[in-house]
Image: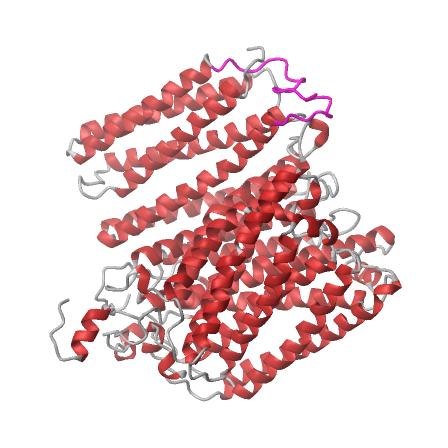
């Protein structure tokens, strides 16, 4: 903006998207309230909110990419972005702490008085749980494998191998989609429901939020793939890719904890479906 | 200030030399699309004052109701909101009032003023940065806070429990917040926390990145002004505590609407789990509200004592210690839920540990004043008031830290007295101290010292009259969160209501003062506070240029400054 700038920081012009984004978030949450209480025009409000949020994310990140290409992302600004992404992931970790906390509470201290739990874990009402060493183990391997393919893409990028970058990203995205498909299949065939007891509640909310993060990560990587085809990223500057890879590894690590704590330990001793 | 009041040499041209740096965008772009940390800070302050008026008016309704035993006005308020006054609806109205008062004052007054307002304004200025690290994200943090407030206001127009609005307490304990109030008002209130929380997390990311990555050349962490230290610790608390609240209130949403049983004992759930999750956030939250105040008071006491703050590093790391230990004391809010004795012993001991770094701070402020040439300018009297009154609240905090004592006074007015001494007096006195300290810098106008002092004394008498009698009410057994009481409690309650009127009068003085300053105040010099004010914001014009530090200031280290003063070449 100003002409006399003698530093490497990024001074931005005024932007309307923060206002639109916040208004869309409020529209979305209000739409959720209307939807949950079967009130008038719930779907309209909800749809408007979601559309506004998608438009905000799209424009906002498009602008960041444009600014990166305009040379606004000096080394110090790239360091900002790194700090920002690491801190964002730290907050996400604490979000999952909340869900694991409830899981441990229910599993270690199963409610004695509730008829559906009856002091045992998994609860009395749960006749069978998923066999952790069937599809969940396969999903674990899929995500671990996707962690290596994203590293393949990263190293290809660093060494100027654009073809390897695309192949690695294609493979990672394919594995991510496969993971989500298997999760969907498992949810559809699970021997227990969502509500009514602590096992179903904590299981579906923890794995469901993880699944949502997988979807977000897959979209993030897909954006990177599109950008790779457009010729974006250089071996020296490709933070958009790195952020996607960090996020993907974070999602991967959360799954490892879910697999060990929820699927293996949390279902120990119960009949497998 | 930092440790280096004598050696702080900021070599930079005054921003006002650059006319192009002062080019401001048009009205809509400037205030609705802002990417400027000072404008966003101003927006936050205006928002916080507005929310403070709403939250303060609600306490007025509460004090009017509590002035005498019996239900006086609640039915009138129910009818005003379009409901039918009856016993349940009246009591529900009371719950709505206490909920709104708590949520507004915590999330929409103190936090936006301290972090969004003064943090946004002065963290970049104090570290010699041209703006925040993520200026656009800074703006969405603000608008998400507004969105959260709007959601909370919407909740008052739809059904909650036995009437309109969310009557769940600011803690939103299950099962009152789940099966206890099934209407959409509670969902609006919960989503209001989601929205404001998301804004705060983004703000925390912004502050930490700014402080770690945008300090002027030469400003090491150990030379950083204490206000910036306080914001750094606060931002970490926000970043790590708020997501846990987000998870907890999401569980409330699914329990309410989608059949989960996280907090429903019938399905094996655990209402106490909600309290654990809430207070794992809630206790760091109370430090989020007071740590920036510690930072402000440190700046002000040093400025008006014309001395660097006593024990600078001890002050910085005391805040770090408070922040760290603050994460492992949460269950002292839950002594009466049936925790076993060993757990209570741990939380008692851990909580009392916090008195140590807090004591370091109190005594260091006193040691800073000791032997200084103290000037009792308006920010200083507010800061000294904060030190005194926060100490009162801190001492009752040590009482309450004891599980055994808390068993007796839990959920009584003793607790209300305690947390209003640390918040309405600790946090709010530091806010007014900061306001009078930085108002000339932000507006370019001097406020009236006379009115500021008058504001202080009237406010001081008013709030003490409101809250000091509450200690006695609590010890006599008057419970919190009730709109009615036995006639034995009348005298102290009446006194508290008189105190509220005095406090409200002092706020009129405040607004007159602000209006006077803006309309007729003397033009503020770059540094109105003299040689004690050594931080970088005082090297800029008042108000600062639209984009400051176009050329970054360089902070010399002590040795270089010493060498230069003694005619030796500096080795940069």
**In this picture, is A8 found above or below A226?**
below
The C terminus of chain A - image quarter: top right
Query: Which residue is painted at 72% across and 58% down in the image?
Result: B97
Does B297 lie within the magenta span?
A: no
Which residue is nearer to you in this view: B360 or B64? B360
Query: Can the viewer see residue A51 in this picture?
Result: yes
Q: Specify the segment rendered in magenta.
A: A109-132
Residue B327 image position (x, y, % from top left): 51, 47
Query: Which residue occupies the foreground of this view, A1 or B336?
Result: B336
Q: Nearer the viewer, residue B301 or B159?
A: B301
Q: Position of residue B203 (x, y in %)?
A: 44, 55
Q: Is residue A62 left or right of residue B478?
A: left
Placement of B230 over or under B198, stated as above or below: below
Q: Residue at 35% of width from left, 57% of height from top? A: B210
Based on the picture, tell me whether residue A122 belongs to the magenta stretch. yes
Residue at the far left in the pictured view: B569
The answer to whether residue A150 is left or right of residue A267 is: left
Residue B253 visible to an observer of this rendering: no
**Residue B425: quadrant of the picture:** bottom right
- Residue B87 position, x and y percent, is 87, 53
Q: How is the image coloured?
A: secondary structure
Q: Position of residue B388 (x, y in %)?
A: 57, 72
- The kind of secondary structure the magenta stretch mainly shows is loop
- Within the image, what quadrant is residue B342 found in? top right
């Amino acid at each position: 903006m100003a002409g006399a700038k003698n530093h490497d920081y990024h001074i931005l012009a005024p932007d309307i998207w923060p206002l639109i984004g916040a208004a869309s978030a409020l529209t979305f949450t209000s739409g959720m309230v209307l939807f949950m209480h079967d009130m008038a025009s719930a779907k309209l409000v909800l749809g408007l909110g979601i559309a506004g949020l998608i438009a905000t994310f799209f424009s906002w990140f498009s602008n960041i990419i444009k600014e990166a290409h305009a040379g606004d992302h000096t080394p110090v600004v790239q360091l900002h972005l790194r700090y920002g992404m690491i801190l964002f992931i730290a907050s996400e970790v604490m979000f999952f702490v909340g869900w694991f906390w409830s899981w441990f509470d229910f599993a270690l201290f199963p409610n004695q008085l509730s008829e559906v739990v009856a002091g045992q874990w998994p609860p009395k009402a749960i006749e069978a749980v998923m066999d952790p060493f069937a599809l969940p183990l396969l999903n674990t391997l899929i995500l671990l494998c996707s962690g290596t393919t994203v590293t393949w893409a990263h190293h290809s990028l660093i060494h100027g191998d654009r073809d390897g970058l695309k192949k690695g990203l294609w493979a990672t995205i394919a594995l991510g989609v496969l993971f989500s498909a298997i999760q969907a299949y498992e949810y559809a065939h699970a021997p227990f429901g969502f509500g009514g007891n602590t096992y179903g509640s904590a299981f579906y909310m923890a794995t469901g939020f993880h699944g949502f993060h997988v979807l977000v990560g897959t979209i993030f990587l897909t954006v990177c793939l599109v950008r790779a085809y457009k010729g974006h990223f250089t071996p020296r500057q490709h933070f958009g890719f790195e952020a996607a890879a960090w996020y993907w590894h974070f999602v991967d690590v959360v799954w490892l904890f879910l697999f060990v704590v929820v699927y293996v330990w949390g279902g120990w001793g119960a009949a497998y479906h | 200030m930092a440790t280096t009041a004598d050696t702080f040499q900021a070599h930079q041209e005054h921003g006002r030399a650059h006319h192009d740096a002062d080019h401001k965008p048009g009205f809509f772009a400037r205030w609705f699309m802002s990417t400027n940390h000072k404008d966003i800070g101003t927006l936050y302050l205006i928002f916080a004052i507005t929310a403070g008026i709403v939250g303060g008016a609600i306490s007025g309704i509460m004090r009017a109701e509590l002035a005498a035993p019996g239900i006086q006005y609640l039915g009138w308020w129910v009818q005003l909101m379009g409901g039918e006054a009856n016993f349940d609806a009246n009591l529900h109205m009371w719950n709505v009032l206490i909920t709104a008062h708590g949520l507004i004052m915590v999330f929409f007054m103190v936090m936006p003023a301290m972090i969004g307002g003064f943090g946004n304004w002065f963290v970049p200025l104090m570290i010699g940065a041209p703006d925040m690290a993520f200026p656009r994200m800074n703006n969405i943090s603000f608008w998400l806070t507004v969105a959260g407030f709007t959601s909370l206001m919407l909740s008052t127009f739809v059904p909650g429990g036995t009437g309109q609005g969310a009557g769940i307490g600011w803690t939103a304990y299950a099962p009152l917040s789940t099966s206890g109030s099934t209407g959409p008002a509670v969902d609006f209130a919960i989503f209001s926390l989601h929205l404001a929380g998301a804004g705060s997390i983004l703000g925390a990311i912004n502050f930490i990145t700014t402080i770690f990555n945008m300090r002027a050349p030469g400003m090491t962490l150990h030379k950083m002004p204490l206000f910036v230290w306080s914001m750094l610790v606060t931002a970490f608390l926000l970043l790590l505590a708020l997501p846990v609240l987000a998870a907890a209130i999401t569980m409330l949403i699914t329990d309410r609407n989608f059949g989960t049983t996280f907090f429903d004992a019938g399905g094996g759930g655990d209402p106490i789990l909600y309290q654990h999750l809430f207070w794992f956030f809630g206790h760091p939250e109370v430090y989020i509200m007071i740590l920036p105040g510690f930072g402000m008071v440190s700046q002000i006491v040093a400025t008006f004592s014309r001395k660097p703050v006593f024990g600078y590093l001890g002050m910085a790391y005391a805040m770090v210690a408070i922040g760290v230990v603050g994460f492992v004391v949460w269950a002292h809010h839950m002594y009466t839920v049936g925790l076993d004795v060993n757990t209570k012993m741990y939380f008692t001991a851990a909580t009392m540990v916090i008195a140590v770094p807090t004591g370091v701070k109190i005594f260091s402020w006193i040691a800073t004043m000791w032997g200084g040439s103290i000037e009792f300018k308006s920010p200083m009297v507010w800061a000294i008031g904060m030190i005194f009154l926060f100490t009162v609240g801190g001492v009752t905090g040590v009482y309450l830290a004891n599980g055994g004592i808390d068993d007796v006074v839990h959920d009584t007015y003793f607790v209300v007295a305690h947390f209003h001494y640390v918040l309405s007096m600790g946090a709010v006195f530091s806010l007014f101290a900061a306001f009078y300290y930085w108002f000339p810098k932000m507006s370019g106008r001097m406020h009236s010292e006379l009115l500021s002092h008058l504001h202080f004394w009237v406010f001081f008498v008013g709030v003490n009259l409101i809250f000091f009698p509450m200690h006695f009410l609590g010890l006599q057994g008057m419970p919190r969160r009730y709109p009615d009481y036995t006639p034995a409690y009348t005298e102290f309650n009446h006194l508290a209501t008189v105190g509220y009127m005095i406090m409200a009068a002092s706020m009129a003085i405040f607004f007159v003062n602000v209006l006077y300053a803006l309309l007729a105040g003397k033009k503020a010099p770059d540094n109105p506070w003299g040689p004690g004010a050594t931080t970088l914001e005082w090297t800029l014009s008042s108000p600062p240029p639209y984009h400051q530090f176009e050329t970054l200031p360089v902070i010399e280290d002590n040795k270089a400054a010493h060498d230069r003063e003694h005619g030796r070449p500096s080795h940069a």
